[in-house]
Image: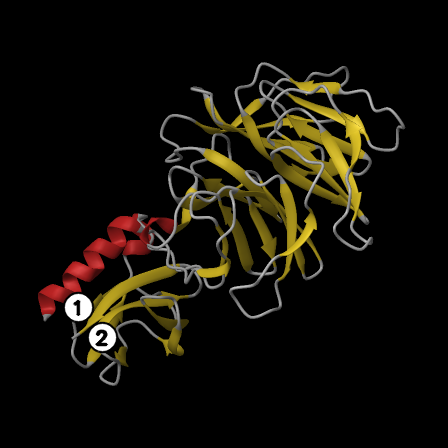
């Protein structure tokens, strides 16, 4: 029996740095890509069917999508919302918009065409930033006939974008030099020169697609890496990402990501679904030596585990292998925790929201 638990732990830790219980939100879709939230309504673009749908995220999962746009689009990729105006980028080079306050199905209106291979869009006030094949451009959405302005050029397949103040972060997927870069959008004259944020070498990223910013934390959808990673944008550049969750155990290929509170929604084109997982609590298995100084023993244990390496009394929480809270309390250095009532298996002891220790109850 001990070998079974140990094998489970090895397989689990080899596939995931963090544990998150992933929930299917909408299934049987058709290449979902770009997403945007409006209150409880999550709008998403279906690339293959050239349609826009929405779901009410407060409903019981899985949720049946409501069609919003069924005609007039060609391979939609990205979405951006300005009040009731939903802007839609299309792979062929056109941006359209709809008024989501109208009764669906809604017929889109063309905003601009003649662009090149659009993959994503993001709004900053009245400026709509557009990821094209080899550059990022922008238009003023208040203009009757918008004229695109180059923001940054000589890129290779930019897709995801996020804005923090004057900094525009973006991903590249045909580049051998940078995975994630940033520019100052106030640069005059444009185009701006990109600054590497996450370098290609040693980044641990396979293919950065969608981005989502929450305070100083930038979440990254790693499409072929089958995981969600994050960086703290206040750290010294270049930054090495930390894995938030590996989806390869139960899901695949996160493309677009959207945050709603602690819930991170991700579109998964190949799996034909949208799923979500809760970012709190983050159950990281830290590899830093200072954090590894906190240990539990004996491990495995049948009844009691003793915690060493603490400098003071700390709060702790015990989670099972799928991230459910099992127990909580306070612990001092060399104090013991009674685990004899736990079911046999793998558990994680989280201390002070920083240190996580894996232990096995047998």
Q: Read off the residue under disc 1.
A: 299
User: What is the distance, in whole Å, between disc 1 and disc 2 at their CAs?
Assistant: 7 Å
Residue 264, position as x, y percentages in the image:
54, 55
Q: Which quadrant would the N terminus be assigned to in this image?
A: bottom left
Q: Read off the residue under disc 2.
A: 305
| First reached walking from the N terminus: tag 1 or tag 2 | 1
Crowd band around label 2 with a 10 angstrom C-alpha radius: few (<14), some (14–19), many (20+): many
Q: Which quadrant would the C terminus be assigned to in this image?
A: bottom left
Q: In screen coordinates, is 49 left or right of 12?
A: right
**Residue drawn at x 62%, y 39% as measured from the top left:** 50
Image position of 177 with respect to 272: above or below: above
Displayed quadrant of residue 138: top right
**Residue drawn at x 42%, y 36% as measured from the top left:** 240
SS for dot 1:
loop
Whether residue 235 appears in this view of the structure is: no
Residue lying at the far front in this picture: please name it: 71
Q: Which mark is residue 76?
A: none
Image position of 167 with respect to 67: above or below: above
Displayed quadrant of residue 299: bottom left
Q: In screen coordinates, is 1 left or right of 267?
A: left
Question: Which is nearer the eye, 358 or 163?
Answer: 163
Image position of 358 with respect to 238: above or below: below
Residue 193, position as x, y percentages in the image:
62, 17
């Amino acid at each position: 029996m001990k070998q079974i638990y140990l094998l489970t732990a090895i397989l689990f830790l080899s596939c995931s740095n963090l544990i998150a219980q992933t929930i299917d939100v909408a299934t049987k879709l058709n290449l979902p890509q770009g997403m945007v939230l409006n209150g409880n309504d999550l709008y998403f673009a279906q690339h293959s069917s050239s349609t826009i749908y929405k779901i009410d995220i407060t409903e019981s999962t899985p949720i049946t999508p409501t069609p919003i746009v069924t005609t007039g689009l060609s391979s939609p990729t990205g979405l951006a919302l300005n009040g009731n105006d939903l802007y839609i980028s299309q792979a062929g080079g056109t941006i359209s918009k709809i008024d989501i306050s109208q009764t669906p199905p809604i017929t889109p209106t063309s905003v601009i065409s003649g662009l090149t291979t659009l993959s994503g869009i993001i709004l900053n006030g009245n400026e709509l930033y557009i990821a094209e094949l080899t550059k990022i451009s922008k238009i003023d959405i208040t203009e009757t006939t918008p004229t695109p302005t180059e923001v940054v050029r000589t890129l290779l397949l930019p897709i995801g974008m996020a804005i923090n103040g004057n900094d525009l972060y973006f991903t590249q997927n045909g580049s051998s030099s940078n995975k994630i870069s940033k520019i100052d959008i106030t640069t005059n004259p444009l185009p701006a020169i990109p600054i590497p944020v996450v370098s290609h070498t040693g980044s641990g990223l396979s293919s950065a697609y969608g981005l989502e910013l929450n305070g100083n934390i930038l979440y990254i959808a790693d499409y072929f890496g089958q995981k969600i990673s994050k960086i703290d944008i206040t750290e010294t550049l270049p930054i090495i990402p930390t894995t938030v969750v590996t989806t390869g155990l139960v899901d695949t290929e996160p493309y677009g990501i959207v945050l709603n509170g602690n819930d991170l929604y991700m579109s998964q084109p190949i799996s034909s679904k949208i799923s979500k997982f809760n970012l709190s609590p983050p159950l990281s298995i830290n590899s830093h030596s200072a954090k590894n100084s906190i240990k539990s023993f004996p491990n495995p244990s049948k009844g009691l585990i003793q915690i060493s390496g603490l400098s003071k009394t700390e709060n702790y929480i015990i989670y099972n292998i799928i991230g459910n809270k099992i127990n909580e309390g306070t612990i001092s250095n060399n104090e013991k925790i009674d685990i004899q009532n736990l079911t046999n298996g793998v558990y994680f002891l989280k201390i002070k929201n920083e240190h996580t220790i894996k232990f096995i109850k047998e």
